[in-house]
Every structure is written in structure tokens, then in C-alpha cells.
Amino acid sequence: MNNPPFLRLTFAAVLAFTAAALLYADSSKTTARSVSQLAEGIYVIRHPDAPDGFPQGNTTVVIGDESVLVVDSCYLPSSAREDIAQIRQWTTKPVRYLVNTHWHYDHQLGNGEYAAAFPGLDLIAHTETRNQIRGYNPGWFERYPKLGTRYQQILEAGKLSNGTPLTDGLREQIKQIMANRGPVVEEFKSSPGRVPNVTFEHEFVADLGHREVRVLHLGRGNTAGDAVVFVPTEHILATGDLFDSPVPYIGSGYPFDQVVTLEKLLQLDAAAFIPGHGDVLRGDAGRAHIALLRDFLQDVTTQVSAIVHRMGNNPADYDKVRAEVEKAVNFDAWRQKFAGDDKVDRDFFDSFPHPGVVQAAFAQTWVR
């Protein structure tokens, strides 16, 4: 049986994600590069969004006595090169390991820059993440230069390919994306990325020299192959997009599974939480925000499951199911909990995670 259209990361989904990122929320819109030191030899780098509006994931750097481990390599190769230059200011030790927390482009398209800079590099990922990078990247590099035509068609039609009408704000953002795509096209021409060469199923342990780092797959969530990276001696945890701050990225994935995965994440003895996007959260604040996301997913998935049992999971009935979910879940209250009174955060919640979690949960009912 073919998956319904919303199970796939379609062009419309990428466009909606990029446009929302241009408009809203610190967890998905960052205007300046910043560096924070969390402990001796452990740093977090946040990156400005790419010229085409695509956000770039956080990068974590862990330095041991003998070598270095890096978590996620950004979207733009130029950002990865800037990070590499920064790492060389911190240490003369080589980057021995680069971990991809998941396959999404904003966390792994800089892989090739690290491979070129550090010939002995091992690129680590869960087996499913390696499979997705190997499968999706060639098509992305092939399609990206041609997307300008697709954007123009959308502007002329006045709606996305899924039928969603363009608002004035979204129309302006698409025009901005089109105007700024040139530099990104040029970057991708010279840096085609790199596929992980070392995979694991449950755990990979890296010894950097008197500093151990554990790379763990706790279960599916944002993707099928999510990895988290834990430095036990400093109690520092990099979560990838299983957790973002303040507003979550839930445009696809496995929300039923993510409830369980987040509960396992909370069992780790972490005191600092590095999200895939957004600022680092420490201690009780980090745990509370992760628990908030878990409870939100639990609420939505419980209601989707009950409504699908009553109405069925035929893709043709998705709009009807969604309408019932909207009645059953108090999304206004959840918006307030994640975004407070900040208008841009509230708008982002409504434009991406709110519809995304319902769609992803409904999609999962196809495979249970």
C-alpha cells in the first residue's frame, strides 16, 4: 500500500517549513552566529539562517585529550567551514567523530566539509539515518537548482501544491526565498555532502581521551533514526530535533513513538539540554520543557487515536478527522504554554507544529 501524501516530506512541506522559519520564532529563525561554552572543552555554536531562509541546526563540539567529537554539521557548507575554523582556534586535536543526529538537511549537509578537513574522520549515525541521507541527498542536490521554477508556479497559482491559499505574508516570504537562493545554489555545486560511514543500532561510545561520549538511539520521534549525544561526566545532552526550544519542530515524524522516546530522554542524568534549534536549557527548566512537549504529544496522539478508531483512517477523511481533533485538543492552551504572549512564537506554533503533529499522528495510524 502506498503511503498517503502527507507521510512524505513533500515540496509543500519544505516550503511551508522554510517560510515559517523566515517569519517566526527563535527556535527556527536565528539572525546571528553565537558561541557558548558549557564546560571545559564543550561548546555550542548557533548559526544564522541560510540566505534562502532555511534554518541551520545547532552544532556541539566536545574536546577530549586526544580528539574531538562534533554533533551535526549545519545546512550550509560555508557555515561548516566557519565552524571548523573556530574548532581549530580551540584545539589542535583532530575531529575524529562527527555525529548526525538525524537526516534532515539542516543538520548534515556540511558533512563533506568535515570529511575534507579531517581525513581520519568517522561519520556516525543510526543505521536508518545513514539510509535516509544516502537516499534523500542526491535528489535534494538535483532538485534544488530547479526549485525557482516551482516557486514561480506557486506564486502564479496563488496556492501551495496541497491547495493551501497563499497569504500576503507567505507570498512575500516566497519572493524573498527566490531572491536569495543564488548563493545557496553555488554552495551546493561545490560541496555535495557525505554519507555516514559508521552506523549503530542502540549505542556508540566514543573515547576522546579522558572524556567518554555516548551516542544513543532511544527510539523514533522526529525521524526513524534519531540519535542523542550524552557527555556523562558533565551531564550534557544534545537532543537533535527530538527537542527544540521554545517552539518544537513537529512537521512529520512519529509522535506516538516520540512520547516514549522523550520519557527515556528524561531518565538520563542530564543537567544541560542542547536542542536541535534554540537556546540551551539547564536543569529543571530543560526537563520541564521536554516534559511539556511529551505531554502535548500525548494529548494529541490520544485524541487522534480515539477519533480514528471512531471514524477510520482513510486518507480521504483526513480533513474530517482533523476537524474533530481540533475540537478535542485545546490548542489555544498549548500555544500559550509553548509561546506565551510572544506573537511571532505564537504564529510559528500555528503555522508548523500545530498542523504538523496532527498530520503526523494521523499518518502513523496507517502503520499500526
Image (cartoon, grey):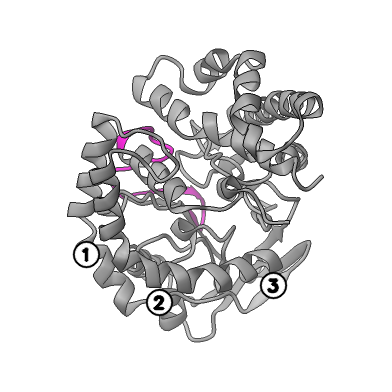
Of marks 2 and 3, which one's residue comes earlier in the chain? Answer: 2
Q: Which residue is mark 1?
A: 183
* Residue contact between numbered discs 3 and 1, judged by CB atoms under 8 Å: no
Q: Residue furthest front?
A: 316
Q: Secondary structure at mark 3?
A: strand
Which residues fall within the magenta stretch?
23-43
Label 1: few (<14), some or many (≥20) within 10 Å?
few
Q: Secondary structure at mark 1?
A: helix
Q: Secondary structure at mark 2?
A: loop
Identify the residue at horizontal 65%, vertical 32% (top origin). 317
Which image quadrant for residue 122?
A: bottom right
From this view, report whether residue 47 is shown above or below residue 273: below
Q: CA distance from mark 2 to mark 1?
A: 15 Å
Which one is in front, 143 or 349? 143
Q: Which residue is mark 3?
A: 199
Could you tell me the amino acid type at mark 1? Pro
Q: Which residue is mark 2?
A: 192
Q: CA distance from mark 3 to mark 1?
A: 32 Å
Give residue 239's position: percent from left, percent from top.
Answer: 60, 48
Q: Quadrant of the C terminus?
A: top right
**Magenta region includes residue 42:** yes
Label 2: few (<14), some or many (≥20) within 10 Å?
some
Could you tell me the amino acid type at mark 3? Thr
Give residue 347's position: percent from left, percent from top.
Answer: 39, 25
Give residue 64's position: percent from left, percent from top.
Answer: 57, 67
Q: Nearer the viewer, mark 2 or mark 3?
A: 2
Could you tell me the amino acid type at mark 2? Pro
In the displayed structure, does residue 291 sit left or right of residue 102? Answer: right
